[in-house]
Amino acid sequence: MSSASTSSAASGALLARQLKQMQSAKDLPGISCGLVNDNNVFQWEVMLMINDGCKYYGGGNFRAHLTFPPTYPLMPPKMVFQTPIPFHPNIYPNGELCISILHPPEEDKYGYEAASERWSPVQTPETILLSVISLFEDPNDESPANVEAARMLRDEREGNNKDFRRRCRKCVRESLGED
């Protein structure tokens, strides 16, 4: 067996344990996980049910795929939101999430992120999803994946309009199948 396939098998076993652990956890409100395909432990389907008290996205149910590389946990997974894609400063229009902890563990060529903010093998699917829920609670408009959403959020924070809140509420309704 090659070292790559040994590594992939070890990654798969780790992911299977982590999935089972998350599925049986009682202290993870708002997070539901499963496999996209029962034969592939490297691709998870997650549902994030955002707390009603969340200012912009409260009550929303957002579905995403978390895709792990064969080199996990040395390299980060990729998270892509499925339709409807949330209108959010940290989610590209194609649904891909942009968050520091999912960036590869290397120096940031732009100098924006410290290496300590990027991926580390101590991260788990649980810490990733808790960070994403936190991002719904407090979007980061300083390094946007969706420039329009970041601009609208800044305008709202400055009291100029409520367009961002209206777009988010529309996303929440769509996530619930109401639009």
Image (tube, rainbow, N blue to C red):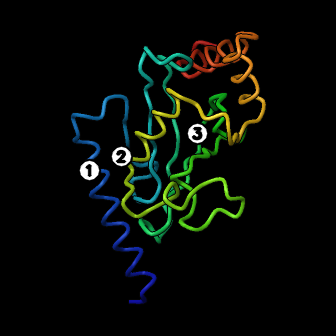
Residue at the image point whose x is 44% and y is 34% from the top: 47
In what element is the residue under mark 3?
strand
Task: Report how far apart the C-alphas of labels 1 and 2 lie in the structure.
Answer: 11 Å
Residue at the image point whose x is 39% and y is 50% from the top: 125
The residue where tag 1 is placed is 20
Residue at the image point whose x is 62% and y is 33% from the top: 83
Q: Is residue 85 above or below residue 58?
A: below
- How crowded pointer 3 is (Cα within 10 Å; few <14, some 14-19, many 20+) is rated as many
The residue where tag 3 is placed is 81
The residue where tag 2 is placed is 126
Task: Report how far apart the C-alphas of labels 3 and 2 lie in the structure.
Answer: 17 Å
Name the amino acid type tagged 1.
Lys
Q: Is residue 34 above or below residue 112?
A: above
Q: Position of residue 161 (x, y in %)?
A: 74, 10
Q: For residue 52, which quarter of the picture? A: top left
Q: Earlier in the sequence, mark 3 or mark 2?
A: 3
Q: Quadrant of the N terminus?
A: bottom left
